[in-house]
Image (cartoon, grey):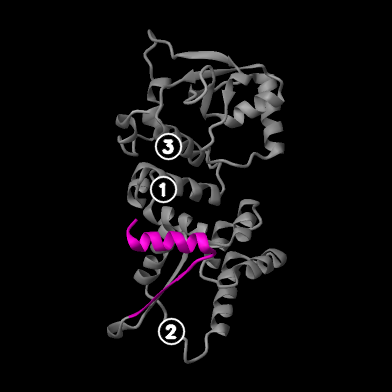
Amino acid sequence: MSDKHEKRGLGRGLSALMADVDLIPSERPAPRQVMPVEQLTPNPDQPRRSFAPEALQELADSLRSKGILQPLIVRPHPNDRGLFQIVAGERRWRAAQIAQLHEVPVIVRDLSDTEVLEIAIVENIQRADLNSIEEAASYRLLMDRFGHTQEKLAEALNKSRSHIANHLRLLTLPDQVQAWLKEGKLTAGHARALITAPNAVDLARKIIEKGLSVRETEELVRRQTAVKDTPAKRSPEKDADTRALEGDLSAHLKMRVAIKHAGQDGGQMVITYKDLDQLDRLCQVLAGH
């Protein structure tokens, strides 16, 4: 891919990138064609990682009777000549195979890696197809691979900066809690309440077993935290700015960050890492590498 494409920056958005698909004048028909399903390959950076079998079967039944009304968007495969990589429409491609359709309608586009990732993320987010962890991982991928900031993502994807930050914070949760969130056993609201809990896995298990609401979860976390704090250690309620800063740092480092500000006497910032790999990454960040 050329540097020109990669350096264009995030922001064209799905509607702009796909404008020439639906808005081509009638004298210039859209470049649609049919292509064998075996000539297509999934996008390895597809944000959506889970495809519910029941939903795929339902879609397959619809495709079998009505056909595929909306073509897939593909690009020439960057590594395998003769193959094409799916940019948007992997779910339709999977369902087409279940329906035993041998060909699917496609629109071939010449897109950079950045544009492919952006289209995949925006399409899934607009259709509410991603769970909270998949959405957060997509934001992290855009930030890590292409150097985009939370502000740039929020502007390009038409989301608030707090929405981006809150999702990124979910990636600091233990893997087991993230798994329950992906499985739908916890909601994003439950998960956000657990971010500051030192025993998040145990609390999450209790929340699932008892079917607690988000508000009940927040109260449970508050009580658990209060029990662990002795009178000598208990600190004043943190202000909104401090909590926001903790959230931003946690999202950036992908580690839990706690700030204890003591006014004119300074304070402490505690960064909790899960393993030696995270410690090594933290050292590199602090060293400016």
Disc 1 from disc 2: Cα separation:
35 Å
Quarter of the picture containing the C terminus is bottom left
Mark 1 and mark 2 residues within 8 Å of each other at the beta carbon? no
Sequence-first tag of 1 and 2? 1
Quarter of the picture containing the N terminus is top left
Residue at the extreme bottom of the image, as rendered: 232
Number of numbered discs overlaid on the protein picture: 3
Q: Is 78 located above or below residue 25 in the figure? A: below
- Nearer to us in this view, 47 or 130: 47
Disc 1 from disc 3: Cα separation:
14 Å
Check disc 2: other Cα within 10 Å, few if <14, some if 14-19, many if 20+. Answer: few
Q: Give the magenta range.
A: 267-289
Give residue 152's position: percent from left, percent from top.
33, 47
Viewer-side label of 1, 2? 1
Question: To which quarter of the image does residue 156 belong?
Answer: top left
Report the residue marked by disc 1.
Answer: 144
- Nearer to us in this view, 201 or 16: 201
Residue 281 covered by magenta stretch:
yes
Check disc 3: other Cα within 10 Å, few if <14, some if 14-19, many if 20+. Answer: many
Q: Amino acid at mark 2?
A: Ser
Give residue 272's position: percent from left, percent from top.
48, 69
Residue appearing at x 61%, y 51% in the figure: 182
Task: Specify the label residue 281 is tagged with.
Answer: none
Report the residue marked by disc 2.
Answer: 235
Report the residue marked by disc 3.
Answer: 118
Q: Amino acid at mark 3?
A: Glu
